[in-house]
Amino acid sequence: MTASPHHQLDGVDLDALAARLGTPLYVYSASAIRQRIQSLQAALHGTDSLICFAVKANSNRGVLALMHAQGVGADIVSAGELWRAMQAGIPPEHIVFSGVGKSEQEIVEALDAGILRFNVESHDELLTLQRLAQSRGTTARAAVRINPDVDAQTHEKISTGKAENKFGVSIDEARRWFAARHALSHVQLDGLHVHIGSQILSLGPYREALKRVAAFWRELAAGGHVLASIDVGGGLGVCYREGHDHPVDAADYIATVREALAGFEGRLLFEPGRYLVGEAGVLLTRAIRVKHGEERNFLVLDAAMNDLARPSLYDAWHDIAPVGSNTHPATTYDIVGPVCETGDTFARGRTLPACSPGDLLMIHTAGAYGASMSSTYNSRPLAAEVMVDDGRYAVVRQRQRFEDMVAGEQLAGHWESV
Ligand SMILES: Cc1ncc(COP(=O)(O)O)c(C=O)c1O
Ligand SMILES: N[C@@H](CCCC[NH3+])C(=O)O
């Protein structure tokens, strides 16, 4: 999301917003999120489908409520995400549950909530689901997550569809599950799921994965197994670096899915995360200090790796720019945070107009895997989050108070034996 020349987002002046609410501050554009949703919904028009937002990308309940208002459900990976989604009003019949390590407690909570579907990732999980559903006198709806052994051509830490990755099962194994389906008295196994990775910038890996999934669906259909749904996961990439990243067009992506699964009469499920919120969010931060070292210039921000972990975790690039007009000469900086780690670096050797302490800057494309991956490392409270829409703003998370940061901690004054 590029700031307009007036330095506004959705008609809200970012300087004024930062002055009022302080920094670091996450700002999400509601209209940008709605536009993304609508681009997928328009491409899916006339198709039996449901978009389930991957809650992990941005789990703020204000964002989830916006998703719900647009008819979008949730793809969850924990009981905490189930709780957030339901708190935001998303009905259980719009919730799918993925993840390799669902605990028994989490499975029970999702069963009791009556969610749409479990995306099952191992045989052990399938048997656990059967046992728990039986014990609760209910039937779980389930899809098998296929690991198609396809390279998503993305960062290795966010690639999920290679055989060596922990996710899903091979088609051979899935075939055995369907062959033994009659033994599952309390699991309705009638779906396929695939998700090969995140920040995918070309259609090739999707085509390859879908080709394998489609062949398996046709094989199952020929064997008399009618599938209620195929869930094609998420993964659509966004632009982190203007002029370098060229994301796939949503309509082309949907056309690719439709083409690969032509003839499928069940429902198509989608689990986009980053695509819906990534470019809709920025992280506003102020320069605290400019430090001219012997070898490098450092621009020290008031945001740090605890607020936005992606650069330190994946060496991820985020465009960073001053907010407002800055016509100072170009200067090259290492842009860092105040945390006591060398890895607390947002960018190395980045050229910007010269900055001074107090200047407001914007870290772009911070709406996905930003706040949701933040921590209180170095006892830095979680940043505030705000939604902007049509000239107004709504705080969707207050900056964390110190009292809340230590909530649940106790002085070890009371010792007990087990
Ligand atoms: C099962 C599953 N679905 C959906 C997503 C969302 O991915 P993305 O944010 O890349 O769309 C993820 C994360 O990669 C995931 O693991
Ligand atoms: N956290 C990753 C994406 C992980 C996707 C989850 N399966 C990122 O920031 O790019």
Image (cartoon, rainbow, N blue to C red):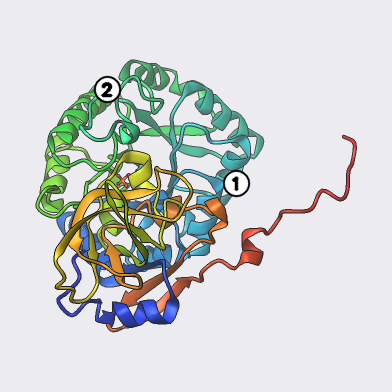
Q: Nearer the viewer, residue 175 or 29?
A: 29
Kindly tell me whether residue 58 is visible in this rendering. Answer: no
Where residue 322 sits, quadrant-wise, is: bottom left
**Whether residue 247 can be seen here:** yes
Task: Give the residue at x 30% y 58%.
Answer: 277
What's the amino acid at mark 2? Asp
Mark 1 surroundings: few (<14), some (14-19) or many (≥20) residues within 10 A: some
**Where residue 292 sits: x, y (%)?**
30, 56
Q: Is residue 312 above or below residue 46?
A: above
Give the labeled residue for mark 2: 149
The numbered mark, 2 or 1, whose residue comes first in the sequence reads 1
- Residue 254 is tagged as none
Residue visible at 38% across and 27% down in the picture: 168
In the rendered view, would you say 96 is above or below 16?
Answer: above
**Residue at the spot x=38%, y=33% of the render?**
190
Mark 2 or mark 1, whichever is nearer to me: 2
Quarter occupied by residue 392: bottom left
Q: Which residue is mark 1?
A: 109
Q: Quadrant of ligand 1?
A: top left
Q: Nearer the viewer, residue 406 or 238?
A: 406
* Foreground pick, 317 / 333: 333
Q: Is residue 388 left or right of residue 353?
A: right
Report x, y in % for residue 402. 62, 65
Number of residues whose C-alpha sits closer than 10 Å to that of mark 2, classed few (under 14), some (14–19) or many (20 or more)? many
